[in-house]
Image (spheres, helix red, strand yellow):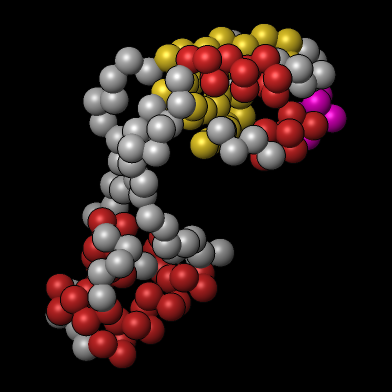
Amino acid sequence: MASKLNLDALDLKILKIIQGNGQKKLKEIASQVNLSLSPTHDRIRKMEKDGYIMSYVGLLNRKMLDLGLLVHCQVTLEKQNRKNFKEFEQAVQAFPEVLSCHLVSGNFDYYLMVVSADVESYNRFYQEKLAVLPTVAHINSLFVMDEIKQSTELPIT
């Protein structure tokens, strides 16, 4: 994978535009960076090939889709070894409720972000999926009261 040093100011400007609106037309992007269509297209394709642009997605309003509860889970495994890490990570991949899962340092092993319709449906997820995993020793659930900032845009310049 290429390093950030392979990107020039125009590439960074293109990336900033794309992450702000993945549906922006090539013509609009080219105009905003003062470049013609073909070189703009070539730069975008190269950044896709090099892995800077991973995918294009639509961001959905989870509350309108009856997924209003956001829960941050701190998960501690019974034993910290390669087998348990692998087993837990494979299991979590199959849970659509889990939006993200990170292996972390500190007082617990994994930090999960989970969505659910309400407390009752989260409780079902907790009891029937997460807590029954044989590698899990402890789960601390933090219920989000209010979202102050939510963004997918990386701070590139």
Identify the image quadrant of residue 137. top right
Closer to the camera in the image, 23 or 45: 23
Q: How many marks?
A: 0
User: Relative to 36, is 142 on the left or the right?
Assistant: right
x and y percentages locating residue 138 in the rendered image? 67, 9
User: Relative to 101, is 28 on the left or the right?
Assistant: left
User: Does residue 118 sit above or below 85 in this rendering?
Assistant: above
User: Does residue 54 sit above or below 154 in this rendering?
Assistant: below
Closer to the camera in the image, 70 or 4: 70
Point out the stretch of residues depicted in magenta. Answer: 81-86
Q: Is residue 77 visible?
A: no
Residue at x 43% of width, y 31% of height: 67
Identify the image quadrant of residue 52. bottom left
Instruction: Give the overall secondary structure of the magenta segment.
Output: helix
Q: Is residue 90 visible?
A: yes
User: Relative to 123, is 64 on the left or the right?
Assistant: left
User: Does residue 99 sit above or below 126 in this rendering?
Assistant: below
x and y percentages locating residue 112 in the rendered image? 55, 27
Identify the image quadrant of residue 84. top right
x and y percentages locating residue 1 in the rendered image? 56, 64
Residue at x 49% of width, y 61% of height: 54
Residue at x 62% of width, y 22% of height: 125
Magenta highlight on residue 82: yes
